[in-house]
Image (cartoon, rainbow, N blue to C red):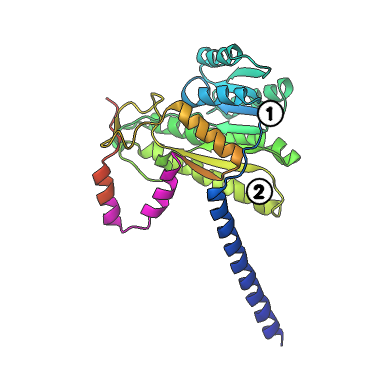
Amino acid sequence: MVKAYNGALVLADVLLLILKILYYICESVYRFFIPAEEKSVVGEIVLITGTGHGIGRELALRYASLGATVVCWDLNEVSNQETLNQIKKAGGATAAYAYQCDVSKREEVLSVAERVKKEVGDVTILVNNAGIMPCHAFLDHTSDEISRIFNINVLAHFWMLQAFLPSMIEKNYGHVVALSSLAGIGGLPNLVPYCASKFAVRGLMESISEELRISSKGKSLIKFTTIYPYMVDTGLCKNPKIRFPNAMPLVSPGKAASEIILAQRRGYRERSVPAIWLTLSVMLRNFPDHALYSMIDFFDSGVEADS
């Protein structure tokens, strides 16, 4: 009798699971054609790392134009101040602040974070954007360079989360955005440590999101968004190799920033820039290895080693 009862419960759970899966598939199809509305960021405190140039600067300018309070972090004090000046020059009532910080150093991150909390308030949107991309064959990387890649591209994310996630958890409100890369989905020559670091960012974001979901029993309202940009024309990618430049051009920093903000405001869990690349990557991973290699060889794109 007990076995029959337990069996009926399992069957009921299976049927409920199937219904949930079908429902969420239908919801996903609906959202493909009718995306969620973009959430207002007016009054949000947005902290962005790496705002001295490139994507980080564009993110700061665009969030400011949308009415958010923007907190700019960069190691380069001069270029970061230039970003702040551009925000102020654009006008509007938006408040903006600039802080010098080496995000690879935990104690410095925690110290500057305390200043932000006292001088600005609790960060509600955190964008971990700072990163470096040395391009060499693996054996040409020095041990110091590999360590620096991981300190900035990976460990900095941990220190930033340790600094700002507790207040989000306390209020059950906030959004964390992390920049990975298409190189965090598929490996590329001349970028072995960089690819590994960007794969790590994806793992970090998936696991921390899942940990909060489980620990809160599904009640956490904190969102996590991981971004996978294609090669962006910021200067980091010094020697891009593109066989079909008209079909696969470099992404402008402005375009990347617009797509990142769109993903954040719509609450996407993952987003590539351009958006099609993430879907293509998932599909291509199901091809036989040699078929995948044939396509990679045909498109012949990536980066050359730095001279």
Task: Specify start and end residues of the magenta stretch as a single range.
Answer: 273-293
Q: Is residue 284 magenta?
A: yes
**What percent of the width, then of the height, locates residue 3?**
67, 84
Q: Which is more toward the observer, 142 or 77?
A: 77
Left or right, 77 with reference to 39: left
- The residue at the point 62 percent across, 26 percent down is 66
Task: Report helix, strand or loop for mark 1.
Answer: loop
Position of the N terminus by quadrant:
bottom right
181 vs 219: above or below: above
Q: Secondary structure at mark 2?
A: helix
Residue 119 percent location from the top left of the image:
72, 20
Residue that extends furthest to the bottom in the rendered view of this protein: 1
Q: Quadrant of residue 77?
A: top right
What residue do we see at 71% from left, 29% from top? Answer: 122
Name the foreground residue: 140 vs 226: 226
Q: Quadrant of residue 291?
A: bottom left
Check contact, mark 2 vs mark 1: CB within 8 A: no
- What is the magenta segment's predominant secondary structure? helix
Q: Is residue 184 magenta?
A: no
- Camera-side residue of 271 and 151: 271
How would you rate the neighbour count of disc 1 (Cα within 10 Å): few for under 14, some for 14-19, many for 20 or more?
Answer: some
Of discs 2 and 1, which sits in the foreground? 1
> Of residues 275 and 1, which is closer to you in this image?
275
* Mark 2 lies on residue: 212
Q: Measuring 51% from the left and 17% from the top, which residue is drawn there?
A: 76
Q: Which residue is mark 1?
A: 42
Name the amino acid, label 2. Leu
In 3D space, how far apart are the residues under numbered discs 2 and 1 (Cα atoms)? 26 Å
